[in-house]
Amino acid sequence: MPFSVREFEALARDRLPRYAYDFIAGGADDEVTVRANERAFARLRLLPRVLRGHANRDLSTTLLGSEVTMPVVLSPTAFHRLADPEGEQATARAAAKAGVVMIASMASTVSIGDIAKAGGADLVLWFQAYIQSDIGITRTLIQRAEDAGCRALVVTVDSPVFGWRERDNHNDFHDLPPGMHCENMRDLAADGGVRNIEMVPELSWDHIDRVAAMTDLPIVLKGVLHPADAMAAVEHGVSGLLVSNHGGRQLDTVVAAIDAVADIAAAVDVPVLVDGGVRRGTDVVKALALGARAVGIGRPVLWGLAARGEEGVTEVLELLRAETDRAFAFCGCASVDHVARDLVREVRC
């Protein structure tokens, strides 16, 4: 078994076709932000407390009313069947087993209904969507998410256009291989291909209001980096925020996601999550100290899936659980609520 997320990535690189590995690993333009997301965590140093007397630690927390076993969620990532034939079904089973939230992508290669069935009653499932110019398509997708038992709707708002990904261009990877589809779109568009998912530059806060009127599900906005936008989101009734720069896959040289967390958490009174660059349990602790309720992981899930299928996703999650628990012990934290702001310092390298 690999002993770190990095070792899972190495296995995945060896096993995946070049185009698939590059699609997962790559980012926009010069991939400055892809690298910055991880380096930003390295700039944050822990300042542990000692002699706290905590023989046992509790990593559990609550996210939008759902109890989860640790403050780690599976961020929405597309095309899991590029990594493993079972795709999102294998991922769902691993998430259910681990007791964590899975955010299923609108661009999944398994339908939201089949993802829910695979995960069963133990799966805490949220659904991610891009608002489409045909609002009827968005309405249908939301209805399907509700029918599948999803407990929240995650609306991605950081992608008015497609990012420029040079790795994909070099590999001529612009749509899924034959026999693979964006299953949530398959009967809503011509062929269920990637090109059928729109990025809509005219999106505004009015669109968020329209989506909110379609559902009783709590809405989480994904892709907020500016505190002013975070405050506006709360004014529009949003229930949570996922601070994210899309893994550096859309706009390059944007601020590292973890660097935006503290200001946003201070500006709003709703749960704040963050994804981008999380590779270790110490990263989880740093994010919590800055005000996040939980972290999201994207690429590590796909590395595990590509390396060892469902078992690989389980192993990635259990590695992060063990690392986070160990970091809690070293830092004198008994629970998520004990992780305080004074636990981290920023060091300019």
Image (cartoon, rainbow, N blue to C red):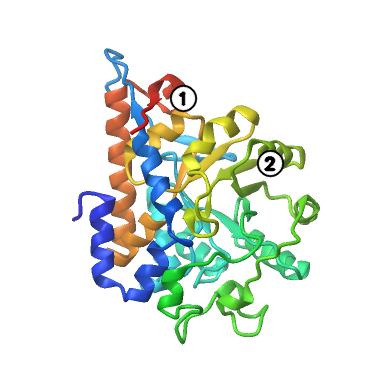
Percent across and percent down for residue 144 are 65, 65
Earlier-in-chain disc, 2 versus 1: 2
Percent across and percent down for residue 148 are 60, 62
Amino acid at pointer 2: Asp
Percent across and percent down for residue 343 are 39, 22
Q: Which residue is mark 1?
A: 337
- SS for callout 2: helix
Q: Which residue is mark 2?
A: 229
In the displayed structure, 239 sits above or below 9; it is above
- The answer to which of 174 and 79 lies nearer the viewer is 174
Q: Quadrant of the N terminus?
A: bottom left
In the displayed structure, 228 sits above or below 156; it is above
Q: Is residue 171 left or right of residue 188?
A: left
Q: Residues within 10 Å of mark 1 (few under 14, many from 20)?
A: some
Q: Residue at x 23, y 63 (%)?
A: 11
Q: Quadrant of the C terminus?
A: top left
In the displayed structure, 223 sits above or below 14; it is above
Q: Is residue 210 left or right of residue 227?
A: right
